[in-house]
Image (spheres, rainbow, N blue to C red):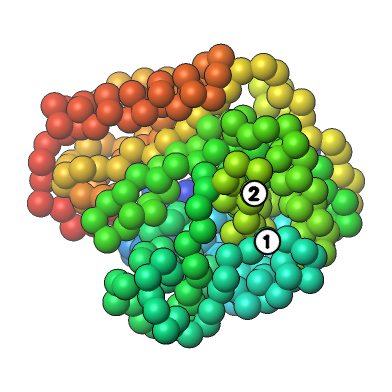
Amino acid sequence: MDSAAVLIAAASGRALAASARRGGYRPLVVDFFGDQDTLAVAEAHVRLGGELRDGIAEPELMAAFEELAAAHSPCGAVCGTGFEDRPHVLAAVARRWRVFGNGADAIAGVKDPACLAALCRDLGIRHPPTSMSPPAQSAGWLVKRRGGAGGIHVAAATEPKSGDGIYFQFGVPGTPVSALLLSDGKCADVAGFSAQWSSPAARQPYRYGGAVRPAPVAPGVAAALAEAARRIVAALSLIGLTSVDFLVDGDDFWLLEVNPRPGATLDIFEPDAGSLFALHMAACLGQPAACPAYPDGAKAAAVVYADGDILTPAQFTWPEWTADRPNGGLAIKTGEPLCTVHAGAATAADAKALVEERVAMVQEWAHVHMDAHETHGHT
């Protein structure tokens, strides 16, 4: 299926599009940003209107896909981040095109907190205490939104929160560690583990900050995490690229959630030769291959959030270690993503330190080179 056109939809489609291009596919991308490097690798692109926080709307996505499909005859669609809380949109896509990845029913089940808690209990995998109603004593509990992503939906249960899909989970100790897997629905291969960290903001204490691979976990713990991840992915019959998130505390760990689609760590696990997107497509076609072997060394990626309202300049030379580079003249509000930065080093600690240094550098450049501006959204 090499050289085939493929529809790609995600909140940000750049990483998927770049991997697809490396894998010999022609990416037809729909996302909220239309960043410079997304447009550089996309065969064609349609930018979604509206606000990122409001999510992907079915009518607009379907219209964008129809526009792209009419000109390029895609083999199907790959959907990344942005569908966890709206499986009905994925179902609409599947009625029109073949979806390479997990279907709406699978995602709805995975993202049902009560079902995931019951499955973990049945499999003997530790999972934080979870409740669909407010706990009698809120101390130590977190409130989350079903299908939420990026950590921005997580808060202390003492914070007022309401609406459909709200549930409660007890906060357990540990370092966030994520396993990336490739599965054909029966067997899953673990590509590796990444450690993640938050970039706290006002009222968003758990906002996603970045990730580094490999995660600094002991070999015995890594083996136990891999076994737990493989078992739950197999029990859910998931296909393609999937990540399983844990909290690791010494020799103990808790499984937090399963993300049944390519996600935020795609960049740091993309091999020097080959393509995770191509492996994802093969697995979804029932032709799984082993995950790539990664050489010694570490890779990290982090999101740079604007710490003030800015207007991106028409001419700005982005360093080669940046990605998701916004176009000039773009109004970005405080707290919205500005770009992504990458770093490589001999150790995970060094890679994380370097990527955090680069985050600070970009934020400083934003103050110097990008005008403060009264914005009207990331449009």
Residue plotted at (43% across, 69% down)? 141
Q: Which percent across, then down, holds residue 143?
A: 42, 71
On screen, 293 above or below 93?
A: above
> N-terminal of the two: label 1 or label 2?
1
Relative side of 74 to 319, left or right: right
Label 1 to label 2, Cα distance in Å? 9 Å
Q: Amino acid at mark 2?
A: Asp
> 10 Å neighbourhood of mark 2: few (<14), some, or many (≥20)?
few
Q: Nearer the viewer, residue 327 or 121?
A: 121
Q: Amino acid at mark 1?
A: Arg
On screen, 376 above or below 191?
A: below
Q: Nearer the viewer, residue 6 or 83?
A: 83
Relative side of 147 to 302, left or right: right
Task: Give the labeled residue for mark 2.
Answer: 252
CB atoms of marks 1 and 2 within 8 Å: yes
> 10 Å neighbourhood of mark 1: few (<14), some, or many (≥20)?
some
Q: Nearer the viewer, residue 94 or 263?
A: 263
Relative side of 12 to 80, left or right: left
Q: Nearer the viewer, residue 269 or 61?
A: 269
Q: Quadrant of the C terminus?
A: bottom left
State which quadrant residue 274 falls in.
Answer: top right
Residue plotted at (42% across, 84% down)? 136
**Under tag 2, what secondary structure?**
strand
Rendered image: mark on residue 126: 1
Q: Which percent across, then down, holds residue 371?
A: 12, 36
On screen, 93 above or below 277?
A: below
Relative side of 202 to 86, left or right: left
Can the viewer see residue 70?
A: no
